[in-house]
Amino acid sequence: MTTTDNANRQEMFSGTKDVADALRFDESRLAAYLADTVEGFKGPLTVRQFKGGQSNPTYQLVTPSKKYVLRRKPPGKLLPSAHAVDREHRVISALHKVGYPVPRPYVLCEDEGITGTMFYVMDMVEGRVLWEPTLPGMSPKERAGIYDAMNDTISRLHTIDYAAIGLGDFGKPGNYFARQIGRWSKQYKLAETEVIPEMDKLIAWLPENIPHDETSSIVHGDFRIDNMIFHPTEPRVIAVLDWELSTIGHPLADFTYHLMQWYSPAPDGSGKAFRELDLGALGIPTAEAYVDAYCRRTGRIGLPQLDFYFAYNLFRSAGILQGIVKRVLDGTAASANAYDSADHTRQIAVRAWAFAKAAGARD
């Protein structure tokens, strides 16, 4: 990706656009439903589609007095257990009640007669969505504050007593990696459009090399900087978005996915990894300092076996992207940029296998 491409990401993915033809629905029917189910809702209603996102189509609902957000399943044939907007609604409902930064949820609608698929409606939280991890235009102090806020937010999530907030049956505690590897192996094979040798090798190697640690917590599943809304002026997370992949799982799967940013290509076109930039000059913590802060906040003593976790997370990302590739071919992908996903799937699989080899795998 070139420097110009990255400079345009903020503009490319921010804001709204006209609703794509394939994702339209009867807006008057939706307005009537919300008037009956959401206290204080009053039209007229204008519907826009958010630019960002490839999985669950997301819409801005504008009324004269308030803005809302609607998340729905995409239309068409879907992979089993994918696009679980009902699970998103359940987890943000539980987290909102205990003060964790998520939008206020209003209603879950399972009646497909309203918009064509299941959906839920929540508050639109006004703030900053930051698409560039280098945070261009900010001072080193501002960047340091943003990264500390992210670290604090994921640490808080992983230390919540999930059973106490009604999420005891939101997932199966223990054996998380084995179940996830099995799930994404199956999903990948269902969506497979070409043979990627590295994916087949990962499917065989990962289940046999899972670290012995059965800690459980709420996991977000896609915790990254552009899935958060920050306060307009303060270095504070005011909403975590996109809970589609959330469950009860292993906190290190969640945290090391987030940590992968440091090992990904730098967004300056240099060919370096993000961690090879002059992070000190930018005010961004090193991967080691970020791990130390997380361990301090969660009571852990170091994070061994990072290469396994990175291989697992990249494998999972490749599986998710392959699902998008399949939906592109089926004509139901929610993003015009989804066509790039086929190349990205292959690239990510190669990187995942490189981490597996660093963890001891053999060709």
Image (tube, rainbow, N blue to C red):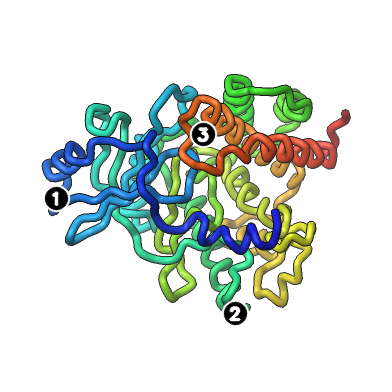
Residue under label 1:
39
Q: Amino acid at mark 2?
A: Ser
The disc, 3 or 1, on the residue closer to the chain's N-terminal end is 1
The local secondary structure at tag 1 comes to loop
Q: Secondary structure at mark 3?
A: loop
Is residue 12 among the parts visible in the rendering?
A: yes
Between 213 and 91, the one lying in front of the other is 91
Marks 1/2 in contact by CB < 8 Å: the verdict is: no
Q: Which residue is disc 2 drawn over?
A: 139
Q: How would you rate the neighbour count of disc 3 (Cα within 10 Å): few for under 14, some for 14-19, many for 20 or more?
A: some
Q: Which residue position holds label 3?
A: 173
Q: CA distance from mark 3 to mark 2?
A: 42 Å
- As drawn, 4 above or below 210: below
Q: Nearer the viewer, residue 3 or 188?
A: 3
Give the mark nearest the N terminus, 1 or 2. Answer: 1
Q: Residue at x 41, y 25 (%)?
A: 76
Q: Residue furthest right?
A: 363
